[in-house]
């Protein structure tokens, strides 16, 4: 089984979610939880962005002992110097350099031609090499970059000393087939490609960030970048828990795995949600409140008989106690009876259960979710009315 390295950018790209601003203490708390989760690399921030971010990256660098701590930099000496300063005291430091390569970015943003971009990136990687052994280079907007030019850029980065070349689908424009093909072509044609790791960095503008990252893995990517809960710029980044659980659930298919401690996923998700203020949607894969909840009677009956009928992942895998049977108008007698037992009403007769079930159905027609309190109230009412 091939190991896929997990590069977590919750503290950098994740913090670029509109409205999110993490202070130093919060960044350290999340970084320590990411360390427990077992991510390989933590991108702690963009030190040149502000003195506050530099200080936060420095605090993370000093606190984390079991992951590479990385700072982001543009291809400018002052950005690289800021990362160097921020990572003082880090046990295992690394730098992430980026420069846009797509025609749209070259023309409108950078106002550089292809050669100028190559030269600027080459110089920056060589400058960073004086201070860092671990250098990742990202051709920003790689997804919309001419493929032959992207091969040239990758070759330049390898020769200049990069140890990882990251392929960002910066604007979430790619389909899985197209994105996977980039990795296939880079692997097959770039001289020296075996000396570095290839990485995938996807955004979710068209809802394909996880699918694109998985396509990259199928085509030889060694590393996936993403965030917890999929937070990030605009529609967000690849959700790391989705990638990790897909590989864990479909290991045979992907022939690849992560070394994450999956039992820490639920806790990490809750912490990131709490400190960023970004609420996880109920239907979010893996970590949404409904991801292990069953409402319909047919599903509940199936799960009560054998969980794998409707659960491809057990909730315990990600550190949750159990799946939930949510009582609503679609629920059946089997789940209702289990709930009564849970609430301590196991001695009720068949007639009492039937009468209570009828009342429950009436209530469920009026109320979307029927809570434990509702059931208790309904049972107390029922028991008073039923002569012993
Ligand atoms: O999406 C992107 O292109 C980025 C780069 C900095 C890698 O976040
Ligand atoms: Zn990004």
Image (spheres, rainbow, N blue to C red):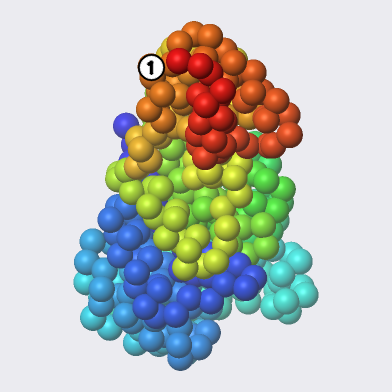
**In the current view of this chain or complex, which residue is farthest to the front?**
387
Indicate the quadrant containing the C terminus: top left, top right, bottom left or bottom right: top left
Helix, strand or loop at label 1? It is loop
Q: Is residue 271 above or below residue 388?
A: below
| Residue 75 seen by the camera | yes
* Count of picture labels: 1
Q: Is residue 368 left or right of residue 119?
A: right
Q: In this view, does 147 lie above or below 316?
A: below
Q: Residue visible at 57% across and 58% down?
A: 279
**In the current view of this chain or complex, which residue is farthest to the top?**
350
Q: In which quarter of the image is residue 110?
A: bottom right
Q: Is residue 36 left or right of residue 360?
A: left
Q: Mark 1 points at which residue?
A: 347
Does the numbered disc 1 mark a residue whose Cβ is under 8 Å from ligand 2?
no
- Out of 240 and 69, give the one closest to the viewer: 240
Q: Position of residue 18 (x, y in %)?
A: 64, 70
| Residue 134 seen by the camera | no
- Out of 170 and 18, give the one closest to the viewer: 18
Q: Where is residue 50 in the image (x, y as percent from the top left)?
A: 50, 88
Q: Quadrant of residue 150?
A: bottom right
Q: Where is residue 52 in the image (x, y as percent from the top left)?
A: 45, 88
Q: Residue visible at 76% across and 73% down?
A: 107
Q: Residue visible at 72% across and 69% down?
A: 105
Q: Is residue 214 above or below residue 100?
A: above
- Out of 381 and 30, give the one closest to the viewer: 381
Circle 1 residues within 10 Å: few <14, some 14–19, many ≥20: few
Q: Residue visible at 23% across and 61% down?
A: 66
Q: Position of residue 318 (x, y in %)?
A: 38, 40
Indicate the quadrant containing the N terminus: top left, top right, bottom left or bottom right: top left
Q: In this view, does 37 lie above or below 249?
A: below
């Amino acid at each position: 089984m091939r190991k896929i390295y997990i590069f977590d950018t919750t503290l950098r790209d994740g913090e670029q979610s509109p409205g999110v601003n993490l202070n130093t203490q919060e960044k350290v708390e999340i970084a320590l939880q990411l360390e427990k989760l077992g991510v390989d690399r933590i991108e702690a921030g963009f030190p040149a962005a502000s003195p506050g971010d530099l200080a936060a990256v420095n605090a993370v660098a000093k606190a984390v002992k079991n992951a590479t701590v990385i700072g982001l930099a543009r291809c400018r000496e002052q950005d690289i110097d800021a990362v160097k300063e921020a990572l003082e005291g880090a046990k295992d430091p690394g730098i992430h350099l980026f420069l846009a390569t797509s025609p749209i970015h070259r023309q409108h943003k950078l106002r550089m031609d292809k050669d100028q971009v190559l030269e600027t990136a080459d110089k920056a990687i060589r400058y960073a090499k004086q201070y860092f052994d671990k250098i990742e280079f990202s051709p920003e907007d790689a997804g919309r970059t001419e493929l032959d030019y992207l091969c040239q850029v990758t070759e330049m980065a390898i020769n200049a000393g990069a140890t990882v070349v990251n392929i960002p689908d910066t604007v979430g424009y790619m389909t899985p087939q197209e994105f996977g093909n980039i990795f296939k072509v880079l692997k097959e044609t770039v001289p020296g490609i075996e000396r570095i790791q290839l990485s995938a960095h996807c955004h979710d503008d068209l809802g394909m960030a996880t699918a694109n990252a998985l396509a990259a893995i199928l085509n030889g990517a060694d590393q996936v970048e993403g965030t917890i809960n999929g937070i990030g710029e605009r529609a967000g980044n690849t959700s790391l828990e989705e990638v990790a659980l897909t590989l864990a659930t479909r290991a045979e298919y992907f022939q690849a795995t992560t070394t994450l401690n999956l039992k820490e996923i639920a806790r990490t998700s809750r912490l990131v949600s709490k400190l960023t203020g970004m609420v996880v949607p109920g239907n979010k894969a893996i970590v949404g409140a409904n991801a292990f909840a069953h409402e319909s009677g047919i599903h509940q009956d199936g799960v009560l008989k054998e969980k794998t009928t409707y659960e491809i992942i057990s909730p315990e895998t990600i550190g949750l106690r159990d799946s939930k049977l949510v009582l609503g108008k679609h629920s059946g007698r089997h789940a209702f009876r289990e709930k009564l037992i849970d609430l301590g009403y196991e001695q009720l007769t068949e007639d009492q259960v039937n009468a209570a079930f009828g009342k429950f159905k009436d209530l469920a027609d009026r109320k979307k979710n029927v809570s434990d309190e509702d059931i208790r109230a309904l049972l107390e009412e029922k028991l008073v009315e039923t002569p012993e």
